[in-house]
């Protein structure tokens, strides 16, 4: 079974993904693939540098992610240019990793931008981790040390809460405790694996 897992930034997606992995699911992590396709020395990184300039490379030859983030989350056209480079590479890697999974595996695709991608229909189930925007901002500021302004800019670049809920076949409310979250994840996992 192929399951898409999504949610806004800092909604708790990675937390849910690790709980599903503990329960035996195979995880394909979109944020990790997004890093892999622009790792040092890759053709993806060469394309990003060609589009955005050499100054986005650190002296070691890595992508300066905070610098690129400052550009693309302040300018939608720049973000679209970056996505046009990275998204095809990311979706290619998703397909390769999925092909390597076993036929009986519960394969969970953690895709931050699933609602934006228009690909929700390609999954058997879509799990949406849902929290109010204010809680996203609070977690980014308190636990990750972001400024409120940066947190809001990143959230503004994403689908709305309503757009994400519209693609959900399971909604995972993450406004409670981690224990409550785990109980909900166990419940969904039991339903998915009982089929
Ligand atoms: C601009 C970059 C270099 C900034 O890197 P940074 O280390 O600050 O963030 P990171 O990649 O860890 O992403 C953290 C979160 O930001 C959000 N985010 C990332 N890219 C985007 C985007 N294009 N649009 C909206 N939100 C995004 C997601 O919620 C993601 O989980 C990076 O986000 C990037 O390359 N983005 C384009 C690729 C992409 O769309 N990734 C999303 C997963 S498919
Ligand atoms: N129910 C909860 N109670 C308290 N803290 C939580 C809860 N769920 C998640 N968190 C914390 O909130 C932060 C964001 O969670 P997590 O990293 O899982 O989100 P994410 O959606 O994967 O984020 P990103 O979009 O950046 O990848 C983490 O520090 C996590 O420990």
Image: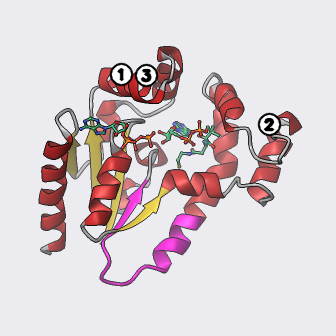
Which residue shows up at 39% across the image and 36% down it? 8
Q: Which residue is mark 2?
A: 56
Q: Position of residue 32 (x, y in %)?
A: 54, 55
Which residue shows up at 49% across the image and 24% down it? 145
Q: Which residue is mark 1?
A: 138
Judging depth in this view, the residue of 42 and 111 nearest the camera is 42
Magenta stretch holds residue 69: no
Q: Position of residue 120 (x, y in %)?
A: 37, 54
Query: In the figure, is residue 180 to the left or right of 53?
Result: left
C-alpha distance separating marks 3 and 1:
5 Å
Q: Which quadrant of the figure has residue 195? A: bottom left
Q: Which quadrant of the figure has residue 106? A: bottom left
- Mark 3, ligand 2, within 8 Å: the answer is no
Its colouring scheme is secondary structure
Magenta stretch holds residue 94: yes
**Span highlighted in magenta in the image:** 93-110
Tell whether label 1 touches label 3 (CB within 8 Å): yes
Q: Is residue 177 above or below residue 108?
A: above
Please, which residue is most extreme toward the bottom here?
A: 103
Which mark sits nearer the N-terminus, 2 or 3? 2
């Amino acid at each position: 079974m192929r399951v898409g897992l999504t949610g806004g930034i800092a909604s708790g997606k990675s937390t849910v993904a690790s709980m599903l992995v503990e329960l035996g699911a195979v995880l394909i992590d979109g944020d990790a693939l997004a890093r892999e396709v622009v790792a040092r020395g890759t053709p993806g990184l060469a394309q990003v540098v060609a589009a955005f300039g050499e100054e986005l490379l650190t002296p070691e030859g890595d992508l300066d992610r905070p610098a690129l983030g400052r550009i693309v989350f302040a300018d939608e056209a720049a973000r679209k240019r970056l996505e046009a480079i990275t998204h095809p590479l990311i979706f290619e890697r998703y397909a390769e990793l999925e092909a390597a999974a076993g036929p009986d595996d519960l394969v969970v695709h953690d895709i931050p931008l699933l609602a934006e991608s228009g690909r929700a229909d390609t999954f058997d189930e879509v799990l949406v981790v849902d929290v109010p925007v204010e809680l996203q901002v609070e977690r980014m500021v308190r636990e990750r040390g972001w400024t409120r302004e940066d947190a809001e800019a990143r959230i503004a670049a994403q689908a709305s809460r309503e757009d994400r809920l519209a693609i959900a076949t399971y909604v995972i409310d993450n406004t409670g405790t981690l224990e409550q979250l785990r109980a909900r994840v166990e419940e969904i996992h039991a339903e998915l694996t009982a089929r």
